[in-house]
Image: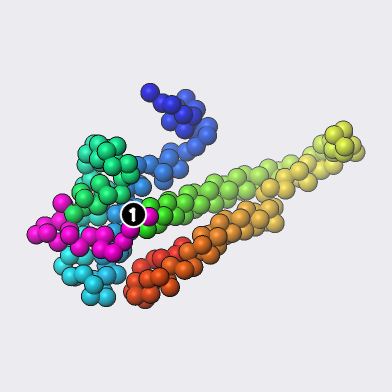
Amino acid sequence: MPASLIDSAVFRDIFSTEAMRGVFSDENRVQKYLDFEAALARAQARLGIIPKEAAEEICRHSNAAEIDFAKLKTQTERIGYPVLPVVQQLVALCRDGLGEWCHWGATTQDITDSATVLQIREALLLIERYLDGIAAALAALARKYRDTPMAGRSNLQQAVPIPSATRWRPCSPRSRGTSSASMNSARASWSANSAARPARYPRLAAAGLPLRAS
């Protein structure tokens, strides 16, 4: 039984979208964990930290479709967080014990933070797409009704008539630019907070592992 508006069959599309729910779904979050593990394995193999064969095997099974979510639920309830159960399943999927090289030198917080940022990045792209659609619709209305008179407002009262186009400011390039600037600010904030990561992991940074948001 749904317990929130976002899960409600009646209200969910008022407060969210199918695409946005997909971004923050269990399946996508687990996939982001696996994307991290695959990127880590590839970088470590290039540096000679783990065998190339192990990295190839880890990447081959870094697919959320191979994860047993019923088992993941049970293990998460027992342990208290999902990262370790996901890693354990990934290790078991790999042949000849090559999965033992999975998660080499990483921490639960590394995966949790990175997966969250990857989800946020997907969400921001969706929001920008929605804003583009809204701006285009408002621009069309502004062009269509630019000369239609409407009551102006001043001190919570009607004032002299004005062209309705002056009320369609959200569709203006300046307003759209402000929204884009907000998105860029969010990305910049993440990057600033993660600035120390390449210093902590210089060899991984040199190998191309995405240690900060792009």
Residue located at (27% from left, 75% from top): 47
Q: Mark 1 highlights which residue?
A: 108
Question: Can you say whether 149 is above or below 102 in the image?
Answer: above
The residue lying at 59 percent from left, 59 percent from top is 185
Asked whether the viewer can see residue 17, the reply is yes
Q: Identify the residue at horizontal 87%, vertical 39% (top origin).
A: 154
Looking at the image, residue 213 sits to the left or right of residue 159; the answer is left
Between residues 144 and 19, which one lies in front from this camera angle?
19
Quarter of the view holding residue 200: bottom left
Q: Which residue occupies 25% across, 55% down?
A: 62
Q: Secondary structure at mark 1?
A: helix
Q: Magenta segment range?
A: 92-109
Coordinates of residue 42 in the picture (x, y in percent): 27, 67
Looking at the picture, how far across and down is residue 203, in whole percent? 34, 75
Label the magenta part by its dominant secondary structure: helix
- Left of 52 or right of it: where is 150? right
Q: Is residue 91 magenta?
A: no
Image position of 99 with respect to 140: above or below: below
